[in-house]
Image (tube, rainbow, N blue to C red):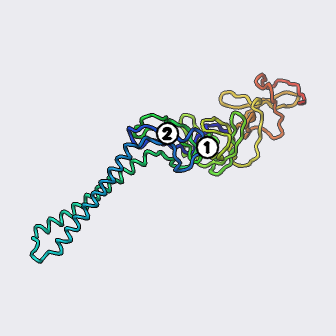
Amino acid sequence: MASGPVEPWQEVIVGAELSGLRIKRVHAEVGQVVRKGALLAELDAATLEAQALEAEASVAEAKALQVEAATSAARGEALAGTGAISQRDLDQLRAAAGSAGARLQRAEAQLAVARERLSYARVLAPDDGVIASRSAVPGTVVTNGMELYRMVRHGRVEWRAEVPERDFPQLGIGQAASVESRAGDRVEGRVRVISPGLDPATRSGVAYVDLPVGSTLRAGMYANGWIEVGTTEAMLVPLAAVTSRDGSHYVFVLAEGDQVRETKIQVGMTLDRSIEVTSGLPKDALVVTSGAGFLRDGDRITVVERQ
């Protein structure tokens, strides 16, 4: 048995790419399922639209100047060698054509930047998922990197089972798991990843168990569960039958004359209200299942049948 939190498989933070703009409208709410590219929020883009129009005008102007300069340079090339144009003037026409081409490239680059900034005014979902939280509020002035939404990618959550050191070597990727919330809802999953090491403080490792999309388990819950590490025969006794002393475990076994004998055992995994006995107890032994804490070796008891 293991326990641990239910967490998003991957959580995506959707932030603002610009500063100084107000949030004009929000389009997504917590719990909403969205597709990649869905519009989540809009920023007031009046300033950016004006800058994009100005950049478009600059490109149009640069194109006209580049055509004019290229035409003049072509005429000069046609007159070269006729004596109608000096070499100096021809060089100036060539240089003017080159400068006009460079100005056009710069204007086109500035237009691309303006359009890119304008696109940031529409905040889009980077992937399919479920909105986990919303910080975007209409009227708020955003800053670069400011968090607007959190998304659970593809709506997937996982159980991060904290497995004790003694059971950790038995884990394997693909093993089946059964997870149960405190409300009693049970969900089946499979181990996706196993942590490479143990936490030195708790002496436990983490098994990441994929849970089906749409299950009743939600991120933030704490759940108990079981991971199926294989099938093997085991001897189980009730936890109430086991006493502990000086780091060792004991049970009381019924002997002749209705006396009990304290028997030292080795234990393994704990399952619900039972514990595995790995050695020290014969298979046909009759174990005292209640009141063990009040007995001493050699005490005589009365055996009664359970109703």
Where residue 61 appears, as percent x and y from the top left, is 28, 57
- The front one of 286 and 153 is 153
On the rendered structure, is 271 left or right of 222?
Answer: right
Describe the element under mark 1 as helix, strand or loop.
Answer: strand
User: Residue shown at 18%/73% (left/top)?
Assistant: 77
On the rendered structure, is 3 left or right of 239?
Answer: left
Where residue 185 appears, as percent x and y from the top left, is 72, 38
Q: Residues within 10 Å of mark 2 (few under 14, many from 20)?
A: some
User: Residue shown at 56%/39% (left/top)?
Assistant: 29
The image's mark for residue 166 is none
Locate the C terminus and report the quarter of the image it occupies.
Answer: top right
Describe the element under mark 2 as helix, strand or loop.
Answer: strand
Instruction: Report if residue 207 is visible in the image.
Output: no
Q: Alpha-carbon distance for marks 1 and 2?
A: 33 Å
- The front one of 21 and 71 is 71
Please, what is the three-letter code of the amino acid marked with disc 1? Answer: Glu
Q: Earlier in the sequence, mark 1 or mark 2?
A: 2
Residue identified by numbered label 2:
25
Residue identified by numbered label 1:
158
